[in-house]
Image (tube, rainbow, N blue to C red):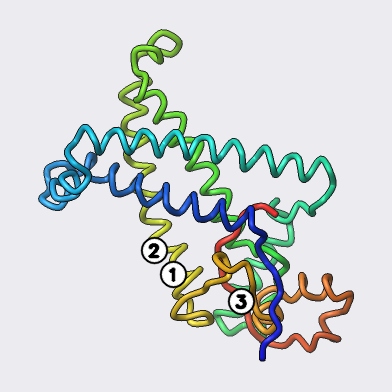
Amino acid sequence: MSEYIVRFNVQQRIEHLVTMVVFALLCFTGLPQKFYTTGWAHVLVDVFGGIDNTRAIHRFCGVVLALSTVVHFAMALNTIVGKRTRLSMVPSKQDFTDAIGTLRYYLGVADKAPPFDRYDYRMKFEYWGLVAGNIIMVLTGFVLYFPTLAARVVPGEIIPAAKVAHSNEGLMAFLVITIWHIYNAHLNPDVFPFDTSIFTGKISRERMLHEHPLELARMEGKSLADLGHGHGHGHADAGKMG
């Protein structure tokens, strides 16, 4: 039987579940408003009980997204100040080195891919992309939610600009999640048909050795040689700061 290691705590799993549900609802209620001339958009709007209900659900989820983002960073900052965690999601020079090393491995120039720690450069790219996207969506969303109030404090041209930014960023986020994240986190050949670690919180030691050998070595107080780490590379499973 495989030995399992706790990779995500309860807080991280709940955060991911909330983000996943809220993001799905934002897409299902937002994209039909962007593509309102299509037949499928009308079908989705009807599913949610009409355009007024669709907009209400979208705005409610937007507020939840904003609050969850604030809570996420507040808890992360509290953990960092208390020195209870490493700055594992902060990009470093090593990430650029790892990216080049991975490319060399994929091209057959290198014999093996670089070993990764808790989060590799792909996870960090996706995470900070999500953070930037959230900030854009929340700010532009509130401008569109309260246009009259916004017009009192910012130039009026900001409102139509916010509409364009909100709409296009929403579409880009949808494409990134459905094409990049879902494949890498759940459909990757290493974990096909589904990676359950973000839901169960656990990952097998074999996967840790394959995908996050540096973290495993630190946890067990060993070197990579002691672990017997060989060829292979990790994939971008879902994760947040921690």
* Residue placed under numbered mark 1 in the picture: 183
- Element type at marker 2? helix
User: In the image, residue 115 lies at what x, y percent?
Assistant: 71, 75
Nearest-to-viewer mark from 3 and 2: 2
Label 1 sits on what residue type?
A: Tyr
- Element type at marker 1? helix
User: In the image, residue 10 lies at what x, y percent?
Assistant: 64, 57
Characterize the local packing of mark 3: few (<14), some (14-19) or many (20 or more) Cα atoms within 10 angstroms: some
Position of 236 with respect to 228 (left or right) is: left
Nearest-to-viewer mark from 1 and 3: 1
Position of 28 with respect to 234 (left or right) is: left
How much space separates mark 3 and mark 2, taking CA atoms?
A: 24 Å
* Residue placed under numbered mark 3 in the picture: 104
Position of 107 with respect to 78 (left or right) is: left
- Residue drawn at x 15%, y 52% as measured from the top left: 40
Classify residue 94 by image quadrant: bottom right
How much space separates mark 2 and mark 1, taking CA atoms?
A: 6 Å
Q: Which mark is residue 179?
A: 2
- Residue drawn at x 53%, y 49% as measured from the top left: 129
User: In the image, residue 75 lies at what x, y percent?
Assistant: 69, 42
Q: Which residue extends farthest top?
A: 152
> Which is nearer the N-term, disc 1 or disc 3?
3
- Residue drawn at x 70%, y 69% as measured from the top left: 6
Q: Quick check: 153 above or below 168? A: above
- Quadrant for the C terminus, please: bottom right
